[in-house]
Amino acid sequence: MPLTPLDIHNKEFARGFRGYAEDEVNDFLDQVIKDYELVIREKKELEAKVTDLTDRLSHFSNIEDTLNKSILIAQETAEEVKGNAVKESKLIIREAEKNADRIVNEALAKSRKVAIEIEDLKKQSKVFRTRFKMLIEAQLEMLQNDDWDNLMELNKELLEQGQE
């Protein structure tokens, strides 16, 4: 067990015939007691400081571990978000390409349909012009022949053909 200042103070030495001077020994022991008390006090203060610093170091180590874990989680989350964004952009591009293909195909189909309708209208126009020309020529011929009755019959026939 370590020596305490009280132990030093209470220590009594046996008296011998030619021993040390008692006052000097007592003065020296008083000085040792003061110094020893100071050393014990400093030791306690240092132990308290070491305990406090150890606690703080532990606290900061925990914070560091937590921050490192948070950084790793943030990096993983960022990678995941980036991967999801890339996937989503590819899906959007594919969808846009499909829509563009569909629109182009619909436009081509409509243009083909319009082209067919134009061709049909051209044919109908040609047939109509030919019939109209025949009608006018027939009427002109009748006018020249004064054959009005035949003109009326021909007109009826042409009108009936036009309705078909």
Image: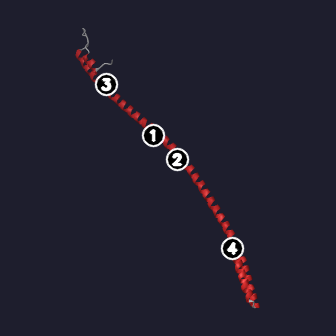
Residue hosting label 3:
40
Q: How many numbered markers are drawn?
A: 4
Q: CA distance from mark 3 to mark 2?
A: 60 Å
User: Does 67 sit above or below residue 96?
Assistant: above
Check the picture and name the quadrant holding the N terminus: top left
Compared across the picture, whether 104 is left or right of 7 comes to right
Name the residue type under label 3: Ile
Compared across the picture, whether 130 is left or right of 87 comes to right
The picture quadrant where one finds residue 27 is top left
Depth check, mark 2 against mark 1: the one in front is: 2
Name the residue type under label 2: Val
Is 67 included in the stretch rendered in magenta? yes
The dot on residue 81 is: 2
Q: CA distance from mark 1 to mark 3?
A: 40 Å
From the top left corner, tell me how far across and down residue 20 is, in percent: 26, 13
Is 8 included in the stretch rendered in magenta? no
Q: CA distance from mark 4 to mark 2?
A: 59 Å
Residue hosting label 1:
67
The picture quadrant where one finds residue 2 is top left
Please rate how many residues cluster around mark 1, counting C-alpha atoms within 10 Å: few if below 14, some from 14 to 19, many from 20.
few
Please rate how many residues cluster around mark 4, counting C-alpha atoms within 10 Å: few if below 14, some from 14 to 19, many from 20.
few
Q: Element under label 4?
A: helix
Depth check, mark 3 against mark 4: the one in front is: 4
Q: CA distance from mark 4 to mark 1?
A: 79 Å
Q: Do callouts 1 and 3 mark residues in contact (Cβ within 8 Å)?
A: no
Marked residue nearer the N-terminal end (4 or 1):
1
From the top left corner, tell me how far across and down residue 103 is, in percent: 62, 61
Residue hosting label 4:
121
